[in-house]
Amino acid sequence: MVEIRTTSTKIFNGSLWLDAYLAEPIATGSYPAIVVIQEVYGVNAHIRDVTERIAKEGYVAIAPAIYQRTAPKFEVGYSEEELELGRFHKDQTKADELLSDIQSTIAHLRMLPSVEQAEIGVIGFCFGGHVAYLAATLPEITATACFYGAGIPVMTPGGGVPTIIRTPDIKGTVYGFFGTQDPLIPEEQIDQIEDALHTHGIRHQIFRYPAGHGFFCDRRDGYSAIAATDAWEHVKELFGRLKP
């Protein structure tokens, strides 16, 4: 584990300033960068922990606030009421705006001396898993970790053709992590994602665990230590390919 520093920062996207949480190694050097996409609960303690955990593995990690337009500083816990609030703001997002925010995040990373021209990856959880699949279509993204992203075969944020239709635009490697007991993602949808990645020749691996939704988050009732531990090893393997 490397020593890191953390800071709250802002990312400029046209007329909008996005809040973001940044974690990076203290030691001078050039590191691959990872964009961390929140759950519906915002850039909360769990997402900050994940961002720091990635940085400690030798990456520059940044978590942009993807609800900035409707709910600046949004951060909630895991009660039913908070979940419904998070879903409300999720429903206000649009695919083109999300992609624009992530592109601006990448541009921000490129200005950091610790990143410059290094490789870029993305990881997302819950709704952020869906957004990470979207982000995989950006040419700058070479590795994507998608954790239980619901709705990929059947919808896209803001409406329009399902996100899965964009699969041919993916240039990098995709690792997908799903629970076979997830009420939000029928196993047939996991099959559809895997089939699309295979059909279009996208480098990928799909990992299925006997777990429910949110199994990676140790603050949620559905947390599975066994699944989370195994998934993390695969994440390290995936992002390890970004290192020179």
Image (cartoon, grey):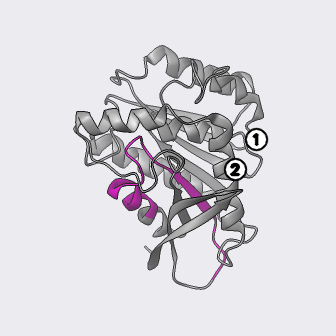
Residue topped by disc 1? 171
**Residue at point 64%, 58% (across, down):** 105
The residue closer to the viewer here, 50 or 19, is 19
Mark drawn on residue 138:
none
Q: Please identify the quarter of the rendering in which residue 125 is found.
A: top left
Q: What's the residue type where badge 1 is placed?
A: Lys
Mark 1 and mark 2 residues within 8 Å of each other at the beta carbon: yes
Q: Is residue 140 above or below residue 206?
A: below
Task: Please tell me which residue is depicted at 42% across the width and 50% down the height of the picture.
Answer: 232
Question: Where residue 141 sits in the image (x, y, percent)?
Answer: 70, 50
* Depth order, front residue of 80/212: 80
Residue position for label 2:
141
Pick the quarter of the image with the N terminus: bottom left
Left or right: where 242 falls relative to 148? right
> Observer-nearest residue: 177 or 64?
64
Residue 15 sits inside the magenta stretch? no
Q: Is residue 154 above or below residue 240?
A: above
Q: Who's the residue at 45% across and 61% down the image?
A: 51
Q: Earlier in the sequence, mark 1 or mark 2?
A: 2
In the image, which residues are magenta?
A: 29-51
Secondary-structure class at tag 1: loop
Label 1: how many Cα within 10 Å (few below 14, some 14–19, many 20+) = some
Q: Is residue 48 magenta?
A: yes
- Asked which secondary structure carries label 2, the reply is strand
Q: Is residue 172 left or right of residue 206?
A: right
Which amino acid type is shown beneath numbered disc 2? Ile
Q: Please state the horizontal and vertical placement of residue 152, each as a whole percent of the image.
A: 56, 25
Which residue is pictured at 35% across the width and 44% down the height? Answer: 216
Of all residues, the one furthest to the top in this rendering is 188
